[in-house]
Image: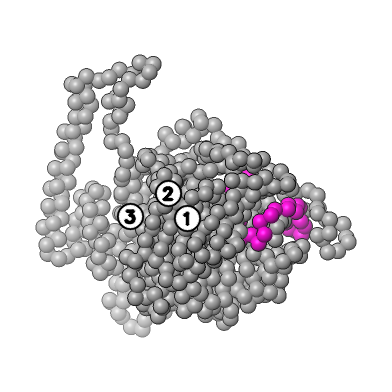
Amino acid sequence: MAVANTTKTSWKLQEIVAHSSNVSCLALGKSSGRLLATGGEDCRVNIWAVSKPNCIMSLTGHNNPVSCVQFNNSEEQVVAGSQSGSLRVWDLEAAKILRTLMGHKANICSLDFHPFGEYLASGSMDTNIKLWDVRRKGCVFRYKGHTQAVRCLAFSPDGKWLASASDDSTIKLWDLTAGKMITEFTAHTGAVNIMQFHPNEYLLASGSSDRTIKLWDLEKFKMIGSSEGETGPVRCLAFNLDGCCLYSGAVDSLRVYGWEPDRCFDLVPVGWGKVADLAVCNHQLIGVSYNLTNVSSYVVDLMRVKKSGSVIQGMIQDDQPLPEPSLKGSTLRRNYDRPLTTCNAQRVKQSSVSERRSPEGERRSPSSEDEKDEKESSAEIRNPEDYKEIFQPKSSICSLLKNPPVASSTPVLRVEPTVVATAPRPISVVTTRSQISNHTPAPCPDPPQPVAIAKAKTQTSIIFSTRNEPIGLNVGDFLPPARNNRPSVLSDDEALAQIRKGHDTMCVMLTSRHKNLDTIRSVWGSGDVKTSLDSAVSMKDLSIVVDILNIINLKASLWKLDLCTSILPQIEELLQSKYESYVQTGCTSLKLILKRFWPLISDTLTAPPSVGVDITREERHQKCKACFKQLKNLSNVVKNKADKVGRHGSTFKELQLLMAPLDY
């Protein structure tokens, strides 16, 4: 039951008993602001819908108290770290354990998911930072440099950098592609508890136990602002969705900051005590705090909060009049849509250490839980109704329309409001998974017109591999007539004619495909994969190439450099295909080539010329040169498709990250 606050700007939403023992950590889903994960000393992770009193799911598996928890960007997965140093990742939609990751030797203090790929960063009291590949269940990199516990980790919006903050009062910025530290910020005098990247600009905000908030220019790597109005340690920060201001969750209050020059726009009293996490959604700010076994949630109406204009008295240290806000910084500071990072030799500190680790080497690191099997972890659904509403929409059409193309940058959200008693401005409750996972920032509050949405949908050319409607048939012809009796029901003969339409053509195509596959099979029997693939390419039938690739992709040892030169031109056609299954196969093959052969191609092309005549080396050099040229062409295709939304956009963004070394 919500209780109205004394002001109309903020109010308490609800208070729940979250665990059977003390709550030790919590996290809000930042994309929607409507999901909450709590971790407790009872070794459980509980999932809640904000504003609803009942637990949706309870995740078990840890044998030690949960110390840190975090959602991924789509809010389909949640990771929890324990005091023993182990990590567990759950798939919320499938309601099952996904991965158990071992490697840290002490309490997990910080977690963050990569914005695009299946990667996860973790920081611990053992001072180490580990980058995990969730799919391969292994550690990709270990970053060493901090001398005390790593309290916060944050990936940059473009996925190129990782920022880490520590109790040693420093912030380190790591280049993921190069595996090196770019720079270190040392202006804080106390433990750095929280960091947030600006959603658009090369800007980083940090909050510390020294009661200051500092802002860092990530192009020039210098501090551009320091706000000192906080009355206690800074533990929560959140940028407004359009990046116009910064919110700080202080004890029983919310502060709104601007920069260049430093100023506090507003101070809003909120009775949330020591707030633990913030999220911004639909012009509302959600704050959550915990005490013993209870978790409380609060709402601040951002429409009533000052984000510019007058300044709160007493927040500026000197007595000089405030200069006008400078537009220079906002116009000259780079945005994250740039494809490459800007670190150079002067910015990279060679003294930092980044150690390469194989998945096999990190998988069985010592831990008190390394003997526990993943089968002991479970996801118990406590509230089937809410679970089905949020994670399993009734129609799979919802999942296909998770990211509908629209003619406006405004998110399309059909949010069904639920009125909470006595609250002056009730919070909206998300009712379907598609609405939760696809809330994207947009400064404009006006939704696009339905006509524009319908027009954009008709432009979708991708044919999904799984769909509710057959291609080439009008399902409406077989449905009962509408109430206005406009459409007529087909007779049996007409219906059969509709179904048989194109049948003869399909039979001819399948017969031809079967004949071609028989030819490939006879060549495959000789054990020459290269000849088999060349035969498939010569048939000028992409479906045959896809069939062969789907087999080769299952066994990486079949891949050779000769194979890459033949298949890379075909991958370009697959990536531009209208068939989802073809695109998926092309992406899988390209990832395999980049991970398996890029080091060889790079080393061969950058190696000094050999003395004398080496025919084998020359042949390898020519093959690597051809592969590099084809990969450069593919990088342009990948970049063009990386801006797409939905599952394919994430896949192409991951490929773009893998192909970043091509541009160096």
Q: CA distance from mark 3 to mark 2?
A: 40 Å
| Residue, disc 2 | 383
Badges 3 and 2: C-beta atoms under 8 Å apart? no
Horizontal and vertical percent for residue 90? 40, 60
Name which residue type carries label 2: Asn
Q: Is residue 288 magenta?
A: no
Count all numbered tags in the image, as a single digit: 3
Badges 1 and 2: C-beta atoms under 8 Å apart? no
Work out whether residue 62 can be spotted. Answer: yes
As drawn, is 557 to the left or to the right of 528? Answer: right
Q: Secondary structure at mark 3?
A: helix
Q: Earlier in the sequence, mark 1 or mark 2?
A: 1
Image depth: mark 3 or mark 2 in front: 2
| Residue, disc 1 | 47
Looking at this view, is 478 or 229 the one in front?
Answer: 229
For this orientation, the residue located farthest to the top is 485
Looking at this view, is 537 or 445 the one in front?
Answer: 445
User: Measuring 53% from the left and 43% from the top, which residue is drawn there?
Assistant: 429
User: Measuring 11% from the left and 62% from the top, which residue is drawn there?
Assistant: 525
Q: Earlier in the sequence, mark 3 or mark 2?
A: 2
User: Measuring 48% from the left and 70% from the top, which residue is drawn there?
Assistant: 65
Instruction: Choose top left, top right, bottom left or bottom right for residue 209.
Output: bottom right
Q: Secondary structure at mark 2?
A: loop
The answer to whether residue 31 is above or below residue 627 is above
Magenta region, residue range: 257-284
| Residue, disc 3 | 586
Name which residue type carries label 3: Gly
Horizontal and vertical percent for residue 75? 47, 54
Instruction: Mark 2: give few (<14), some (14-19) or many (20+) Cα within 10 Å.
Output: some
Instruction: Mark 3: give few (<14), some (14-19) or many (20+) Cα within 10 Å.
Output: many
Image depth: mark 1 or mark 2 in front: 2
User: Measuring 26% from the left and 52% from the top, which residue is drawn there?
Assistant: 546
